[in-house]
Amino acid sequence: MTTDAPLRLFWFLPTAGDGPYLGSQDGWRPTEFGYMQQIAQAADRLGFEGVLLPTGPSCFDGWTLTSALAPLTRRLKFLVALRPGIIAPAYAARQAAALDQVLDGQLLLNIVTGGNPGELAQDGVHLEHDDRYGQTEEFLTVWRAIASGEPISFQGKHFRVESPGKLVFPSVQKPHPPLYFGGSSEAGLDVAGKHVDYYLTWGEPPEAVAEKFAAARAAAASHGRTLRFGLRIHLIVRETEAEAWEAADRLISKVTDEAIAAARERRSRLTESEGQRRMTALHGFRRDALEIAPNLWAGVGLIREGAGTALVGDPETVAARLRAYQAVGVDTIIASGYPHLEEAYKVAELLFPALGIAPDRPEPRVVSRDFAESRRVRAS
């Protein structure tokens, strides 16, 4: 893949809390709407294309937050989680179409099957690993038909649906908002190949990412489809290499050995995610082997589940490492950094020029002006 095209950069909204240190309450910032608004508006103003909203019992609901933030931003896209096991596909299609209208065609959907049985049980999902992906496959079969306004008569193991096809309030994007998905198991790859637009991976070394993408491409080809690819990763960018590594060390400076041991025990007991297993294998909970590839640092994963690696370095070096991922197929980077407000500025001010990204200064959404005015009138 060519590396001449500009990368699409998204930022992360920390809806389960934020702070300057991992594994510590020092400087902790709880999830508050005002803080989420600051980060979203900064990402919008700085030129990030969109924001990812995570999901789970410890996260502020992404659909509610998106509805509240949309009128306060200009053209920011919102990548919101859609959970197949906890909502009916027909209702989810109507909900997504409505939100896409509110966002004037800026909604993106992240399909999250889930890999933690304990968290899934809180939402009433009690299926084994492959059955959960079977449920996701059925959900997307129904959801895509209804979201596209196509009639469907479906009876599967998990869903039975009769739909005449017409969506009274269709989405702005056709046939429906784009679908993003990350699943590293064979069952997950098959779902990706059959249904989604973007396949996402966490930040493994580029050669491992290339192998995973090859498997995803093969799965898509078996269904007569193609995929685009995205990378979910943390960024620690400073003016010099030394400053960046100092910032990385500072981020985990308050992580204790006891906290790492607890994370190891919790992960071995609770997760069934193949992607999480691959993340954990990169560091093995060892502090002395965290640079797993040039400038690719696994320190975040010592304590944090999910995306556990960061690219660390000066702007030119980090840009070069991102181009290496672009060379194997990545065109979208979904980035984050602690704390997320300050790091959004550092990434935009230092890394954007090295990547040739010029901040976009779009006009506000019409709906944003109307909504903001109504809020002002009510408050006066």
Image (spheres, rainbow, N blue to C red):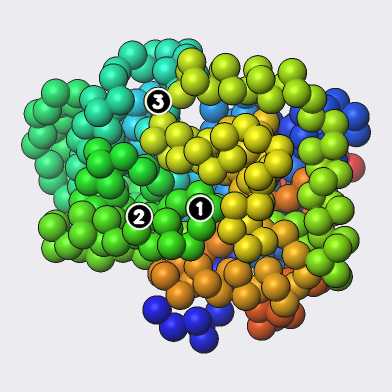
- The secondary element bearing badge 2 is classed as helix
User: Residue at image x 50%, y 53%?
Assistant: 204
Question: Is 334 located above or below residue 364 in the figure?
Answer: above
Q: Nearer the viewer, residue 31 or 309?
A: 309
- The secondary element bearing badge 1 is classed as loop
- The secondary element bearing badge 3 is classed as loop
Q: Which residue is mark 3?
A: 272
Choose mark 1 or mark 3, whichever is in front.
1
User: Residue at image x 29%, y 18%?
Assistant: 127
Q: Which residue is mark 2?
A: 212
Q: Is residue 223 left or right of residue 365?
A: left
Q: Residue furthest front?
A: 288
Tell me the CA gap for discs 3 and 2: 18 Å
Residue 50 visible, this angle? no
Q: Nearer the viewer, residue 281 or 300?
A: 281
Tell me the CA gap for discs 2 and 1: 10 Å
User: Residue at image x 90%, y 33%?
Assistant: 27
